[in-house]
Amino acid sequence: RISAEILKLGSNASKQLFMTYSKFIKSLMFTIHGDLLALRLLILMSLFSADRMPMIDHKKVQEIQERYAHILEEYLSLSFNQESTLFARVVMKLTDLRNINEVHSKMLFKMKVDEFEPLLLEIFDLPADVDCIQVVSKVQTDLTTFAVTTVT
């Protein structure tokens, strides 16, 4: 849990993002009935999005995403067979997540480099004079590369 005191220290934009994200998580968990396997599969679908930039092998990433989508669809139909629209509702949550991610990315772009924690710079092997666009791009590329190499 995050204490109210910590939230009070943030900007209005960060408070709004936190509230939006909290509502999203509650809504998502309600939709998937708190099923953690369904959540993990949805996260994998989100990671393997072929329209992310920069992308080296769009086709391979799209195939992997489709594989996870099929697994999620089968899992949901077996686990919640009375809810015929559940898969569609769960996949629609990816759109909500993408919108939240867009707002978060815009906030990161507005940050000053000195606002990045030294640990973040060290983890992603970034120079101290790096700009925010490079940080976001490097983090997204590293996460996608890690996910692709883990699955293949």
Image (cartoon, grey):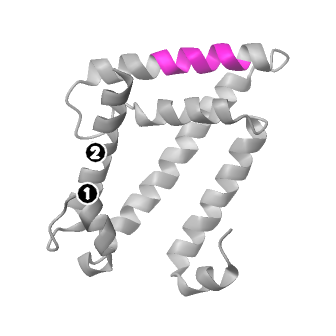
Instruction: Specify the label residue 124 is tagged with.
Output: 1
Q: Which residue range is magenta in the image?
A: 67-76
- Which quarter shows the N terminus? bottom right
Element at badge 2?
helix
- Measured as percent of width and height from the top left, residue 111 is found at 32, 74
- Which quarter shows the C terminus? top left
- Measured as percent of width and height from the top left, residue 142 is found at 28, 45
Q: Relative to the observer, which residue lies in front, 1 or 62? A: 1
Q: Relative to the observer, which residue lies in front, 1 or 9? A: 1
Relative height, residue 11 to residue 61 (above, below): below
Question: Main SS of the magenta segment?
Answer: helix
Residue 101 seen from this side: yes
Q: Is residue 110 magenta?
A: no
Residue 50 seen from this side: no
Residue drawn 32% across and 37% down? 146
Q: Amino acid at mark 2?
A: Asp
Relative height, residue 110 to residue 8 (above, below): above
- Measured as percent of width and height from the top left, residue 32 is found at 73, 34
Q: From the viewer's perspective, is 12 left or right of 39? A: left
Extreme residue in the right direction: 82
Instruction: Quickly name the residue at label 2.
Output: 142
Residue 54, image quadrant: top left
Element at badge 1?
loop
